[in-house]
Image (cartoon, grey):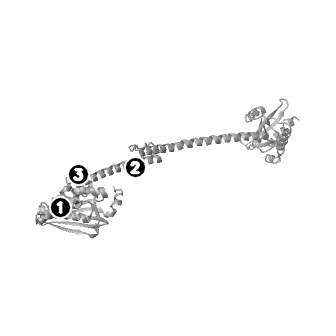
Amino acid sequence: KDSENQNANAVKDYVESDDTTMLISSYYNQYRETDIIRLVLKIYNNSNLNDVIGYAVCDIDSKVIRSIMEKYSTDKTMFMWLQPSGDRPAVSIGSLEGKDVDYYKEISSKIQTAPSGDVAKLLTTSKRVFFQVPQKKYNMDAYSLMPRSLLVQNQRALTKNLIFIALIMILAAAILTILVSRGLTKPLDKLMQTIERIKGGETHLRVDIQNRDEVGILGQSFNEMLDQMEVLISQEYETKLLLNRAEYKALQAQINPHFLYNTLDTMSSIAQIQNCPEVSGLSQSLSNIFRYSLDMKNPFSTVAKEIVHLKNYIYVMNVRMRDNVKYSFDIDETVLQDTVPRISIQPLVENALNHGLRNTRGEKAVIVCAQVREGNLWISVQDNGVGMDAAKVNEILEKNDINLVEKGSSIGLNNINARMKMLYGKEYGIHVESEVGKGTRIYLKIPRVKMEEVSSWMQQPIKS
């Protein structure tokens, strides 16, 4: 009877088996009125592991295990117990009422008689949910009967927690998005404010660049664009100023009283009446020169009119200097109606007479050419005079120093070159070819523009 009460049959079956793991069993101690957990372990011979020399049996009060289990119980309605497979329940916590007690007895009885894997298949549903947690190392599993209401309550609490966590994550994501958005939009807003202020007239302002991201690169590019615009505006202002001064210089270099050419016309008439053809021709040529020079309403003229003006100048110079200079003209008829800035060709011939042929003895010659080359108008004046240092002159012309233009007392090469570059761009202007002792050839390169195209062409931006 004591053997049955102390569940000795489980120990006996363990001793007779080949099982080498520790046995966990239990029995009810009626004197102490509590369940006792029994641990049994076989003792083997060191020299022969198959030789069992004894057994170690240890009984433990279930309250030790129960106190550990109670740490994992969150509600008194939860009922949990430990039960070895094929043995009676070892220890339990919680409380059961009514039909749940019979349900527990049915389950524990099936665990004691049926294999542990088949227990769940034999159960029926009730107000409680059955859970089984098997143990791989020992022959004892953990079981629980959980009230459905508690599971629903826990599920609701879990759902609330998940919703709360989701809201916190959404709020955190929104805050992070706002911070990141401000970090991106704030520099853009600052850039737009700076642009509006610059648009309002504060052109000295620049974007404050603090970061090296895309916005920083945009701000740097914007600052560089403003700097280039200021340079271009300054260059355009200087260009217009220089152009005005050059035109004024061209006008100032001529004798400008209006009554002068009227007086010369009168002198020509008197000389013709008095039978003085040379004086009459000289007066008429001078009158034509002054009339052409004073007509500055349109700064452009045609090649044909420039040649007529040049021939008047040549006649006056021949009478005045008594020089025996041979002039030749090679003018392409297709360029006669092309436009050129007024008083552009005559100063080139004047330069040849004053600097190339003045100190030259023997036959003197000047050749004036106008032709189309590579789509542009090329005008050249060639002399057989003393020549010059062409490299030095071309270097000065390339620099296009405004001070040299201002200091000039006549419409010289620097003046004409500056006017051409201001009107047409840096690729146009004057180029000199010369050889000391053999002569000089001065080229004037400008684009081909007809007189009817001048108005629309002048509205186009000047190439820098």
Quarter holding the C terminus is bottom left
Name the kind of residue labelled 1 in the image. Answer: Asp
Residue 9 location (% of width, % of height) = 84, 40
- What residue did someone put label 2 on? 225
Residue depth check, mark 1 versus mark 3: number of the one nearer the observer: 1
Q: Nearer the viewer, residue 46 or 130?
A: 130
The foreground one among 447 and 165 is 447
Q: Circle 3 sits in a helix, a strand or a loop, which is it?
A: helix
- How many residues crowd mark 3 within 10 Å: few (<14), some (14–19), many (20+)? few
Q: Residue furthest right?
A: 1
Q: Is residue 450 left or right of residue 173?
A: left
State how many labels appear: 3
Residue 2 appears at what percent x and percent y?
A: 87, 34
Labels 3, 2: front one: 3
Q: Position of residue 394 (x, y in %)?
A: 23, 57
**Left or right position of 225 against 389:** right
Q: Residue at x 28, y 52 (%)?
A: 244
Residue kind at label 3, given as amino acid type: Leu
Residue at numbered disc 1: 265
34 on left or right of 169? right
Residue located 20% across and 59% down the image: 290
To which residue does mark 3 refer? 404
Examine the rendered structure and indicate whether residue 211 appears above or below residue 322: above
Residue 197 position (above or below residue 401): above
Which residue type does callout 2 highlight?
Answer: Met
Question: Could you say whether the residue bearing mark 1 is in a helix, strand or loop?
Answer: helix
Report whether residue 442 is seen.
yes
Q: What residue is rendered at 67% in x and 42% in y?
A: 163
**CA–CA distance in space, label 2 to label 1:** 58 Å
Image quadrant occupied by the N terminus: top right
* First in residue order: circle 1 vs circle 3: 1
Q: Earlier in the sequence, mark 2 or mark 1?
A: 2
